[in-house]
Image (tube, helix red, strand yellow):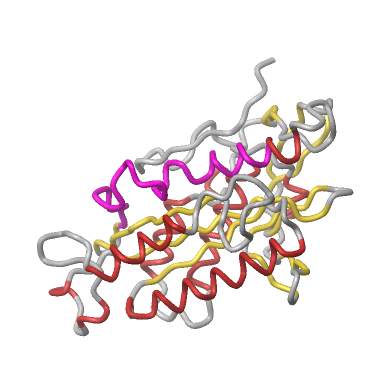
């Protein structure tokens, strides 16, 4: 029986961001965490057994490069990985741990739907998390994804809860935040400052009643933190740090033989950022 609908997607995650009113518990962002984890597995070729939170997937080795991949609701595990940093333990939102090596790749995914004056606090938290983990694991490929709600000044009661003006242009606070994200992205080598992330993305979403959409006009396509580059940069740096020294070793990203009809060949086709499983060519 096909259970493709149970695979976490960005489309479903955006719906939850708009549906859940209270955000203090952090439950509103959990679907985005599950989406990121599923994408690292399906698109990135990271075995589901390495990833937390674990998607409803299982893998079976065919050879070192090719694995069978199937759906199993019982395999899902919503728990986060607790990573020992240079200063303290930290629960990382999404983590891939390579057997015998330790934490290798992770994503911190956050969202802001109001009170945009607090973006500086969010950045301070992100810097601390990134530096803490890189102190202990300089090779850790770390991504920071921030989703911001599109809200015009006329749509909210408090001007502090607005992110865009009536002209559909981002307010000054959003532009400044984008510039900070650009400055803190692009860490390439393990000798570069640990306070920078390997990959950063800013994604603006809009709630339209029961419908959600991605705001395409910001950031601009040429921005270094445009969402279209986020995942591929993580994969490229993982390959450089964990696969290049031993291209035939066990750390390489896998290609999948999908089992049965339980997994689709494309996800989020209704958005501007569709993605596909990393399928074996044979």
249 drawn magenta: no
Choose between 281 and 96: the one closer to the eye.
96
Q: Position of residue 126 (x, y in %)?
A: 54, 69
Choose between 83 and 237: the one closer to the eye.
237
Q: How many marks?
A: 0
Residue farthest to the top, as pictured: 282
Task: Tell me: 109 left or right of 170.
Answer: right
Indicate the quadrant containing the C terminus: top left, top right, bottom left or bottom right: top right
Residue farthest to the left, as pictured: 167
Task: Tell me: 169 left or right of 2.
Answer: left
Determine the residue positioned at 72% across, 32% down.
Answer: 254
Image height check: is 258 above or below 85? above
Q: Position of residue 217 (x, y in %)?
A: 24, 49
Q: Position of residue 220 (x, y in %)?
A: 28, 47
- The reply to whether residue 265 is visible in this rendering is yes
- The reply to whether residue 1 is visible in this rendering is no
Determine the residue positioned at 76% across, 50% down.
Answer: 50
- Magenta segment boundaries in residue numbering: 212-239
Residue 206 picture quarter: bottom left
Task: Tell me: 148 left or right of 72.
Answer: left
Indicate the quadrant containing the N terminus: top left, top right, bottom left or bottom right: top right
227 drawn magenta: yes
Task: Tell me: 100 left or right of 174.
Answer: right
Determine the residue positioned at 74% across, 77% down.
Answer: 88
Q: Position of residue 260 (x, y in %)?
A: 67, 30
Residue 235 picture quarter: top right
């Amino acid at each position: 029986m096909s259970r493709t609908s149970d695979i976490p997607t960005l489309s479903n995650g955006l719906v939850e961001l708009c549906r859940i009113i209270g955000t203090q518990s952090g439950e509103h962002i959990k679907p985005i965490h599950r989406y990121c984890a599923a994408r690292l597995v399906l698109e990135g070729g990271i075995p589901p057994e390495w990833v937390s939170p674990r998607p409803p997937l299982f893998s079976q080795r065919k050879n070192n490069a090719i694995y069978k991949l199937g759906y199993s609701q019982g395999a899902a595990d919503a728990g986060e990985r607790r990573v020992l940093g240079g200063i303290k333990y930290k629960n990382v939102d999404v983590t891939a741990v390579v057997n015998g090596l330790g934490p290798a790749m992770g994503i911190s995914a956050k969202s802001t739907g109001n009170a945009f004056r607090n973006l500086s606090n969010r950045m301070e938290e992100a810097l601390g998390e990134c530096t803490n983990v890189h102190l202990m694991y300089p090779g850790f490929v770390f991504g920071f994804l921030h989703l911001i709600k599109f809200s015009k000044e006329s749509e909210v009661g408090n001007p502090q809860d607005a992110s865009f003006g009536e002209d559909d242009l981002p307010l000054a606070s959003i532009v400044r935040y984008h510039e900070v994200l650009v400055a803190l992205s692009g860490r390439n080598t393990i000798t570069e400052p640990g306070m920078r992330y390997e990959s950063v993305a800013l994604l603006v979403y809009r709630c339209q009643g029961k419908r959600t959409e991605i705001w395409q006009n910001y950031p601009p396509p040429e921005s270094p933190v445009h969402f279209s580059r986020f995942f591929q940069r993580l994969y490229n740096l993982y390959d450089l740090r964990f696969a290049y020294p031993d291209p035939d070793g066990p750390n390489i990203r896998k290609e999948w033989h999908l089992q049965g009809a339980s997994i689709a060949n494309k996800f989020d086709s209704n958005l501007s950022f569709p993605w596909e499983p990393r399928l074996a060519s044979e």
